[in-house]
Image (cartoon, rainbow, N blue to C red):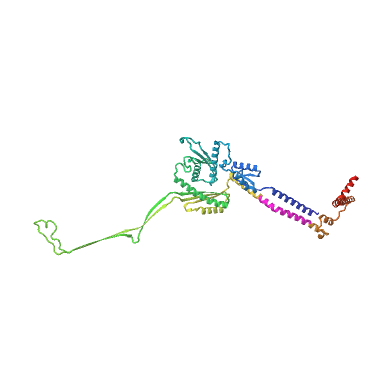
Amino acid sequence: MTTTQKIIVGVVAGGVFIALILLMVSSSTSDFAVLYSSLPPEDAGRIVEYLKESGVKYKLSSGGSTVMAPSDSVYELRMELASKGFPQGAGAGFELFDRTNFGATDFTQKVNYTRALQGELARTILALNPVELARVHIVIPEERLFSEQQRPTTASIVLKLKPGAYILDAQVRGVVNLVASAVQGLSPESITVVDTDGNMMWRGGGANMAQGPSTGAMTTAQLEAKMSFEQEMQRRVETMLDRALGIGKAVVRVYADINFDSTERASEIYQPVAGGLGIPIAEQTTEEQRRSDGPAVGGVAGTPSNVEGYPIVTGAAGSKSDYTRTDRTINYEVSKVVEKAVIAPGKVERISVAAMVDGVLTQDKQETIKQVISAAVGIRTERGDEIAVTGMEFARGASDIDLSEAEADAAKIDRRAFIMRLVKIIAPIILGLLVLVFALSFLRFLRSRPDYAPEQAVGRRVDEVLAQELPPVALSAEQQKARDDEKRRAEVRQSVETLARTKPQDAAKILETWMAEE
C-alpha cells in the first residue's frame, strides 16, 4: 500500500477505536439529577445514609444541602424515601408511633407524644408562604389533683422567614391560635413567638409586639393596610423586572404615605338670582274696608258737652264715611346648595419607589425602567411621587453562592446528559461511515490495478482473489523449499482429515499400524 492508503487505514482504525471508547463510556456513565435541594443537615444525612445502605450512587452539591441521584431512578427514590418518612423537615411527627415498642414506659410515651405534636405543628407552620423554618417547643405539665396546683401548658415558637419576606400581625395571630387550638389546655396567652434574630413577635399575655404596648387596634390595622399596599406595589414591580432582567436581578422597595383620617364635610352654597330680588317663597295680602251711611254723633267730646250747665254744640246732620286699607307681604329667598361629603380613610398622599438593578445601567435603559415602574405603580408627579433607579453590582452571599453552584451543577449535568445522548446517536453513524470509507478505499485500491476484473472476483474468497490478482513475490531456494514442504504437509493433513471423516475405521487401522511400527 502507498503512504496515502496507509494514512487512510490508520485514520479509519483510530476513528473506530475512539467511537468504541465513547460508546463504552456513554453506556457506563449515569446522568445525575437533583433528588432533593435546600435540605437541613439532619435530613441530608439521613437520606445519604439510606442511599448508601441501598447501594445507590449519589452526589452532593451546594454545601451538602442538595442531593443528586441517577436521573433514571429519581422518582422511584423519592417514593421510597417518602414511604420511609424522608425528608422529615421540621422533625419527626406521629410516624414515631408507627412501630409499637412494648417495652416503652409511660414517660417515654409522653415524651414521644410531645415530640410528635411539636413536629406536626412545625410542619403545618411551614406551609405558610413567608416561613422558611419553624420550631415548636411545648411544655405539658403533669396533672395535679387540685386545680389550684395545676400549672398551665406553655409553648414557644421560633420562625425563620424567607429572604425578603414579611409576616403580618394577622398571620402571627393565626399561628398562635393554630398552636393553641391544637394542644389541649394551651391558651394564646401562654405562647411566645420569636424570630431567628431574637425579635419578639408575640409574648405571653396576648400582647402583639408588632403593634407595641400602647398602640390601639385601629393603628395596627392601619399599619397592616399600609404594609399590604406597599407589598402589593413592590410585587408588581419585582415580578415585572424579574421577567425582563432575570430572577434576583432587581430589588424594589416602595414607600407609601397614606392618610387614614376620616373626614365628614357639610357645605351650603348661596347663589344670586337674576334681578337681584331672589326667589319668592311666600306671599301674604291683607285688605280692610269700612263704610257708614247714618247721622254722625252729636256733640263735642269733652267736659262742656257732658257737664251740666255747659252749652251743647251740635254737628252737621246726614254725613257719610268710607275707609279702605290693603297690606301685601312677599318673602324672597336666594338660591342655596347644601353638600355633605364623607371622605373615607386610606387616601394615598405620596408614593416613593426605589429600584436597584444588578449591573451597570445605560441612560436609555434607566429611563425605560423608570417609565415601566411609573406605569405599573401609578406615579403622579403633581402630588410629589418619586422614582429612583440605580444600577450596581450585587454582593454575593452564602445563599446566592449555593444557588449559583446548584445552577452551575445542574447546567453541567444537563450539558453532560446532552453530550451523552448526542454520542449515543452519532457514534453508530460515525462507526458506519468509517467502515464505509474503509471499504470504499479498499475497492478504490483494487480498481486502480490495470488487471482487475470485477466479474472474476464475484463469489470467491478474498485470499483467492488476492492470490490471483497480486503478482508473485520472488523467493529464494530455501524459501521455495520450505513453502513446498508446507504445501505438501497441508495436502497430507487434508487427506488424513478427509479419510477420517469418510472412512473412520480405515483411519483407525492406519493409526494402529503406525503406533505398532513405532
Q: Position of residue 75 (x, y in %)?
A: 62, 48
In-image side of 359 versus 420 (left or right): left
Q: Quadrant of residue 336?
A: bottom left
The answer to whether residue 401 shows anywhere in this view is no
Q: Is residue 431 magenta?
A: yes
Q: Is residue 473 magenta?
A: no
Q: Position of residue 187 (x, y in %)?
A: 48, 41
Does 278 sit above or below residue 141? Answer: below
Q: Write down the region rendered in magenta.
A: 417-442
Magenta region, main secondary structure: helix
In-image side of 52 versus 20 (left or right): left
Query: Camera-side residue: 263 or 437?
Result: 437
Give the residue at x 75% y 56%.
Answer: 437
Residue extending farthest to the front is 505
Query: Camera-side residue: 228 or 53?
Result: 53
Q: Position of residue 84 (x, y in %)?
A: 60, 43
Where is the C terminus found, in terms of image quarters?
Answer: top right
Query: Camera-side residue: 381 or 50?
Result: 50
